Image: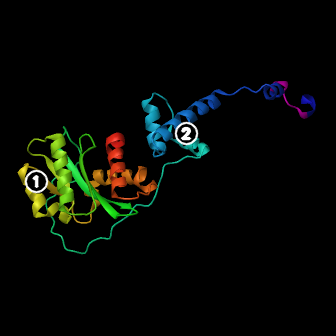
Amino acid sequence: MCSVLQIPKSSYYKTLNPVESNRAKENKKYKEKILKIYNDSNKRYGAPKIHKKLEKWGYKISLKRVQRLMKKLGISSIVKKKYRPHSSKVKVKNRENIISRDFTTNKINEKWVSDITYIHTIKDGWCYLASVMDLHTRKIVGYSFSKTIDTNLTKKALENAIVNQSPDKNLILHTDLGSQYTSYEFCKIVEKYNIIHSFSQKGCPYDNACIESFHSILKKEEVNHVKYYDYETAKIAIFKYIESWYN
């Protein structure tokens, strides 16, 4: 049969006694590792984060290969369109942008950034999370969750961060120009702890990109694939995500 079909006998014996190639063995091992990382992350991680984790574990594998194997496994990170609040037409007075998109630091408690994001619940409607991030560690050092979006929300988040971190003088806090950050009550807290307040330009999220990025990750990895029944349910979930996962 080999003579008639002009096929080498070696090809016949290879199909008769198939041996798994080194590449196939590698792919099988990588698939197991990828699935473990994916499931351990509660199905949050996409190819870039899984690739970074594999590299941390000492595996030499390209990002494209991780993407191919994830496609074969039929898994991917969760992506949903995020909620965008309507822009305000109220005129806002610009204030000094001290950070000016320089997010580099030399130590902890040198530069903090803060912002508010919206989280929906079935029973209580929209709830609000104010977060404070230390740019040196990218850790969420303070946060507050509330049913109302007011100055008290941002004050509690900042006070929480101050209690946790005990910052020295000359700490820079960067926020947007929202009324929750420009109010008299919030400014009093800033002055009390000798914090230097820096502000984004109106309608420019890039000025506060790091905290915007955190809220985007929070939505992608946690909020957007869960329907919270009420405020308390959401509060516990946000606490678990920040303290047990993100930080």
Q: Secondary structure at mark 1?
A: helix
Dot 2: within a 10 Å radius of its alpha carbon, few (fewer than 14), some, or many (20 or more) residues? some
Determine whether, in the image, residue 94 is placed left or right of residue 188.
Answer: right
Q: Look at the image and say whether residue 7 sits in the magenta stretch.
A: yes
Percent x, y of residue 200: 21, 59
> Can you say whether 71 is above or below 23 in the image?
below
Percent x, y of residue 224: 43, 56
What amino acid type is highlighted by mark number 1?
A: Val
Name the colour scheme.
rainbow
- The residue indicated by pointer 2 is 65
Q: Quadrant of the N terminus?
A: top right
Separation (CA) of disc 1 from disc 2? 49 Å
N-terminal-most mark, 1 or 2: 2
- The residue indicated by pointer 1 is 190
Dot 1: within a 10 Å radius of its alpha carbon, few (fewer than 14), some, or many (20 or more) residues? many
Q: Number of marks in the image?
A: 2
Q: Secondary structure at mark 2?
A: helix
Q: Quadrant of residue 3?
A: top right
What amino acid type is highlighted by mark number 2?
A: Arg
Give me the disc on residue 52.
Answer: none
Q: Look at the image and say whether residue 80 sits in the magenta stretch.
A: no
Q: Quadrant of the C terminus?
A: top left
Q: Which residues are magenta?
A: 5-10
Q: Could you tell me which residue is drawn at 48 percent across and 52 percent down?
A: 78
